[in-house]
Image (cartoon, rainbow, N blue to C red):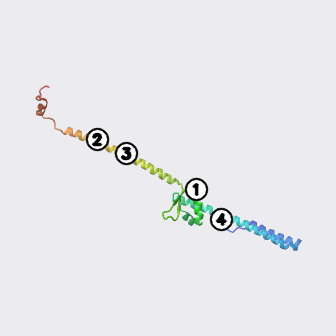
Amino acid sequence: MTLRLNPNLTLAVVGSIGIGVAALVTAPQQLGTAFAFGGGLIGGAGIARDRARRSELKKDNAQRVTGIFSALYESNRGLVDPMQLALIADIPANQAHSFLAGLAENIGGQKIPTKGGNGVIFSFPHTSNALEELSTNAQNWAKAQTQQMAAELETQRRALQMAQLQNAAKLATPPASPQDLWTQTGQMPGQGL
């Protein structure tokens, strides 16, 4: 952090010196009052600078926490551990937990208790999770369709094989001898029917 000259403090110091010199020249008996007034100006400038510094620190802290949250969110596909956030962002664990709890409440996240029961993990909606779910559903649907078609294909294949075997059995039967024809029809082969 760079050290910058506080313009309010500079004005307060210059103003205090000016008031002290003016009081010394015009009313020396009021010199203590003038310096008290100058001290108040310097103190007020210091307090204003401290508030501005704290505000900048809060803003920097908020930017750091949101940046780290975004990185954890993307790398863990929507799952964020408050302890991990606290350690990386260098904030107290209760502050990280409060941040995640508020965020989960606002955007529809969920608290997931850990197995040991000694903490929670927050799950936030993530686009890759939705895409994964859609892909899994599509793959399952395609497998079900493929299995159904494979079963129908197998049934058709067996029916075709059965028909081919029956056809082959008919063709493999030797033709009837003339003697067999005579006994079946009662006429001699070659005689007109």
Q: Are marks 4 and 2 in contact (CB under 8 Å)?
A: no
Q: Is tag 1's residue or tag 4's residue first in the polypeptide sequence?
A: 4
What amino acid type should be assigned to the residue bearing mark 3?
Gln
Instruction: Give the camera-side residue of 14 and 41.
Output: 41
Q: Is residue 188 above or below residue 64?
A: above
Circle 1 SS class: helix
Mark before the other along the chain sequence, 4 or 2: 4
Disc 3 element: helix
Classify mark 4: helix, strand or loop.
helix
Circle 2 is placed at which residue position? 160
Q: Residue at x 83, y 71 (%)?
A: 34
Of mark 3 and mark 1, the one earlier in the sequence is 1
Tag 3: Cα neighbours inside 10 Å, few (<14), some, or many (≥20)? few
The residue located at (40%, 47%) in the rendering is 144
Which of the numbered marks, if any, corresponds to residue 105?
Answer: 1
Residue 182: name its quadrant. top left
Measured along the vertical axis of the image, is residue 144 above or below residue 22? above
Q: What distance separates the C-alpha of mark 4 from that of mark 2?
A: 80 Å
CA distance for labels 1 and 2: 62 Å
Which of marks 3 and 4 precedes in the sequence? 4
Q: CA distance from mark 4 to mark 3?
A: 63 Å
In the image, which disc is placed on residue 148? 3
Residue flagged by tag 1: what amino acid is it?
Glu
Q: Quadrant of the N terminus?
A: bottom right
Which residue matches tag 4?
A: 57
Pick the quarter of the image with the C terminus.
top left
- Residue 39 coordinates in the image, percent (x, y): 78, 71
Q: Residue 157 location in percent, x, y?
A: 30, 43
Q: Are marks 4 and 3 in contact (CB under 8 Å)?
A: no
